[in-house]
Image (cartoon, helix red, strand yellow):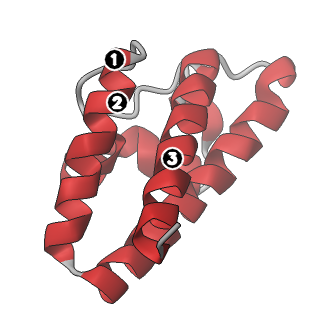
């Protein structure tokens, strides 16, 4: 498996887990205020912020930060064109699995 394929697999797996956690926590990842709130630990931006979800919220926060780090590395190593292609392909795969069409990568653009 090439390094680029490894990035593709990691991003897909992260997006799938992030999507599941976001649903469980009531986090609308299409809103930049929610992303910023999660990353800064202000979990009140989520609809489901009970003690039962505390561990999920912390995991979601950590995975979002990891995802952005991996995406930055991918862009630095392979360029924006490869990154854009991967995001488009990943969105199609996630959409087929029932996730919203809007990309988790679009969050920064909101």
Let me know if residue 31 appears in the view.
no
Give me the disc on residue 44: none
Q: Earlier in the sequence, mark 2 or mark 3?
A: 3
The alpha-carbon separation of the residues under discs 1 and 3 comes to 28 Å
The alpha-carbon separation of the residues under discs 1 and 2 comes to 5 Å
Marks 1 and 2: CB-CB under 8 Å?
A: yes
Residue linked to disc 2: 93
Q: Position of residue 22 (x, y in %)?
A: 55, 27
Q: Position of residue 93 (x, y in %)?
A: 34, 30
Local packing at callout 2 (Cα closer than 10 Å; few below 14, some 14-19, many 20+) is some
Q: Earlier in the sequence, mark 1 or mark 3?
A: 3
Q: 79 or 65: which is nearer to us?
A: 79
Local packing at callout 1 (Cα closer than 10 Å; few below 14, some 14-19, many 20+) is few
Q: Residue at x 70, y 36 (%)?
A: 57
Q: Secondary structure at mark 1?
A: helix
In this picture, residue 24 sits left or right of residue 36: right
> Which residue of the protein is positioned furthest toward the left in this rendering?
81
Q: Secondary structure at mark 2?
A: helix
The alpha-carbon separation of the residues under discs 2 and 3 comes to 27 Å
Residue linked to disc 1: 96
Let me know if residue 48 appears in the view.
yes
Give me the disc on residue 37: 3
- Pair 2/3: label in front: 2
């Amino acid at each position: 498996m090439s390094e680029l394929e490894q990035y593709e697999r990691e991003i897909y797996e992260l997006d799938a887990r992030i999507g599941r956690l976001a649903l469980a926590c009531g986090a609308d990842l299409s809103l930049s205020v929610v992303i910023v709130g999660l990353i800064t630990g202000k979990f009140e931006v989520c609809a489901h912020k009970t003690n039962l979800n505390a561990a999920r919220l912390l995991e979601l926060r950590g995975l979002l930060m990891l995802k952005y780090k991996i995406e930055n590395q991918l862009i630095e190593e392979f360029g924006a064109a490869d990154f854009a292609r991967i995001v488009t392909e990943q969105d199609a795969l996630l959409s087929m699995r029932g996730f919203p069409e809007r990309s988790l990568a679009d969050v920064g653009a909101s």
